[in-house]
Image (cartoon, rainbow, N blue to C red):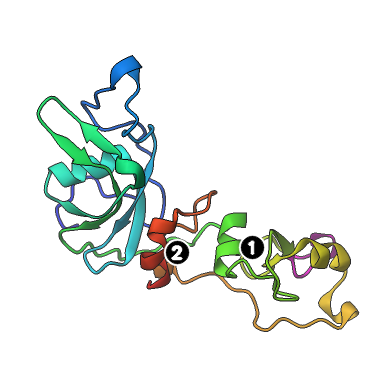
């Protein structure tokens, strides 16, 4: 697998918690330039395809081993410090060697994922969406998956309630579907991805 040691889970968050070894706090026990424990870094394959989301600790380990390079540093001058070394904290990094992922697990559906897939636009009116809706209501036998959930604004969600689109005379511009696995680098997250990741996510 390209010799990168323990391979991060493709498209998911690396479960290894914590900070980089040797992180030295500043005066008062707090380093204003250090990332908090568990900070996330977008990991790209050598081809710049979003591959995984890893902890900041894992990212620094890969960099020190020469197995990845920093593509985008974190905002605010955050860095990891040891007795002899200071490393700018990465926000986006790229593997030095291509890693082939022969099997892609289905993308877990999340509210954040639905909103991201639909560009935060209501599937019914096109306005900004802040929630999700089941096209076929759960009370009418609808499933809770990518193929039956869409982004929606609250007024449309409230108006639709537990009715079918045919009962309202509504139509979808396109049917909802699971995202392409290769473009789903951070869709498994329960939080919105940082703006610094956008160029690599939209290009995927």
| Residue 110 visible in this rendered orientation of the protein | no
Q: From this view, report whether residue 85 is shown above or below residue 129.
A: above
Q: Is mark 1 on a helix, strand or loop?
A: loop
Q: What element carries label 2?
A: loop
- Residue 160, given in percent of the width and then of the height, sits at 85, 68
The residues bearing labels 2 and 1 have C-alpha atoms spaced at a distance of 15 Å
- Residue 53, given in percent of the width and then of the height, sits at 37, 51
Quadrant in the picture for residue 50: bottom left
**Residue pointed to by mark 2:** 184
- Give the extent of the magenta segment: 134-142
Which residue: 21% across, 57% down?
95
Residue 88 colored in magenta in the image: no
**Residue pointed to by mark 1:** 145
Which residue: 85% across, 62% down?
158
Dot placed on the residue nearer the N-terminal end, 2 or 1: 1
Q: From this view, report whether residue 77 is shown above or below residue 91.
A: above
In this orientation, which residue lies closer to the viewer: 80 or 63?
Answer: 80
In this orientation, which residue lies closer to the viewer: 77 or 126?
Answer: 77
Q: From this view, report whether residue 136 is shown above or below residue 69.
A: below
Identify the residue at the far top of this view.
Answer: 28
- Residue 40, given in percent of the width and then of the height, sits at 38, 45
Which residue: 12% across, 44% down?
65
Left or right placement of residue 202 versus residue 81 in this view: right
Quadrant in the picture for residue 162: bottom right
């Amino acid at each position: 697998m390209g010799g990168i040691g323990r391979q991060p889970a493709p498209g998911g968050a690396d479960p290894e918690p914590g900070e980089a070894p040797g992180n030295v706090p500043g005066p008062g026990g707090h380093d204003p330039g250090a990332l908090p424990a568990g900070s996330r870094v977008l990991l790209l394959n050598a081809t710049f395809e979003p591959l995984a989301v890893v902890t900041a600790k894992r990212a620094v380990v890969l960099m020190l081993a020469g197995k990845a390079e920093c593509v985008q540093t974190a905002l605010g001058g955050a860095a990891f410090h040891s007795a002899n070394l200071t490393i700018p904290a990465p926000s986006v990094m790229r593997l030095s060697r291509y890693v082939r992922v022969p099997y892609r697990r289905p993308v877990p559906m999340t509210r954040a994922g639905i909103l991201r897939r639909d560009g935060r636009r209501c599937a019914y009116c096109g306005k900004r969406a802040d929630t999700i809706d089941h096209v076929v209501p759960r009370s009418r036998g609808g499933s809770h998956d990518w193929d039956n959930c869409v982004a929606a604004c609250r007024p449309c969600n409230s108006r639709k309630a537990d009715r079918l689109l045919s009962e309202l005379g509504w139509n979808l511009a396109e049917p909802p579907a699971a995202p392409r696995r290769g473009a789903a680098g951070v869709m498994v997250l329960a939080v919105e991805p940082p703006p610094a990741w956008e160029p690599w996510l939209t290009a995927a």
